[in-house]
Amino acid sequence: MKGALSPEAAAKLVPDGASVMIGGFMAVGTPERMIDALVAQGVRNLTVVSNDSAMPGRGVGKLVSAGAVSRMITSHIGLNPETQALMIDGSISVELVPQGTLVERIRAGGMGLGGVLTPTGLGTEVEEGKQVVEVDGERFLLEKPLKADFSLIAAWQADYVGNLSYLLTAHNFNPMMALAGRTVIAEPNAIVPVGVIPPDMVKTPGVLVDHLLVRANTGGQPWTQKN
């Protein structure tokens, strides 16, 4: 058995310049304590892959406000004026990706696929510089897979071997990102004994999870890491 990590200890694993996938949809399903620890650590020059940049003071928006992000691959920045201003003045490079394409690129990275064929973006700026593939007379863009050094995800429950379950809309990007990160750090609301999570509720098996964060206001729970 080994103890779960504090947010501060987990944040120390993420170096400057790392690529990081961060789960959530407008901060729903986002590991807020992990993000707070990264901000406190003063990490810089991150490449962040996320559905959105949330809002100032929430989720990924905290990293943007702290100057921790140099590049974003995301589908939406419309609710964060700070991200918009930084993109316009060139402080942050933003690659805007259609939402469905983004999650499929992450899935492709996690599954070891060579990419995704999609008609979305044909004839627009999204097509620029990308390979077009014709299948049965129809044209598709080849969108390349996405992987990252780290995947930071929130979960409803984890058990002592790292199996994860999610609640309601927090299912969004988190299960896919757990497949596509070289190191997966999960922030659960609760850590429970093995068997408490029904097998059909396990959406991310523990073999994919490298580290759990301790529950808030506790000294941590033991769990077994399986490689």
Image: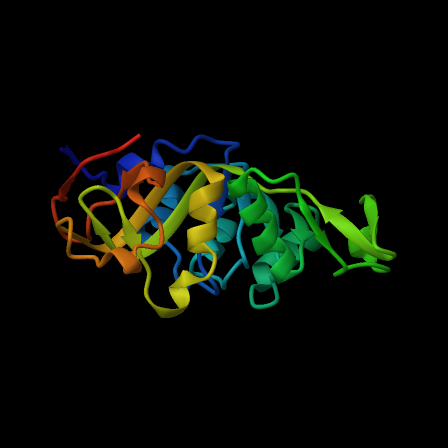
Placement of the C terminus among the 4 image quadrants: top left
The reply, left or right, for residue 188 in relation to residue 2 is right
Farthest-out residue, front: 136
Q: Is residue 10 above or below residue 127?
A: above
Q: Residue sitting at 38 percent across and 42 percent down?
A: 38
Looking at the picture, how far across and down is residue 87, in whole percent?
A: 67, 52
The reply, left or right, for residue 64 in relation to residue 200 is right
Q: Is residue 156 above or below residue 5?
A: below
How many badges with numbers are in the image? 0
Q: Residue sitting at 56 percent across and 63 percent down?
A: 80
Q: Is residue 122 above or below residue 2?
A: below
Q: Residue sitting at 78 percent across and 51 percent down?
A: 141
Q: Nearer the viewer, residue 149 or 171?
A: 171
Examine the image and state in which quarter residue 84 appears. bottom right
Q: Residue sitting at 79 percent across and 54 percent down?
A: 140
Looking at the picture, how far across and down is residue 4, in whole percent?
A: 20, 39
Q: Nearer the viewer, residue 195 or 47?
A: 195
Q: Nearer the viewer, residue 217 or 28?
A: 28
The reply, left or right, for residue 27 in relation to residue 222 is right
Looking at the picture, how far across and down is residue 42, in whole percent?
A: 42, 38
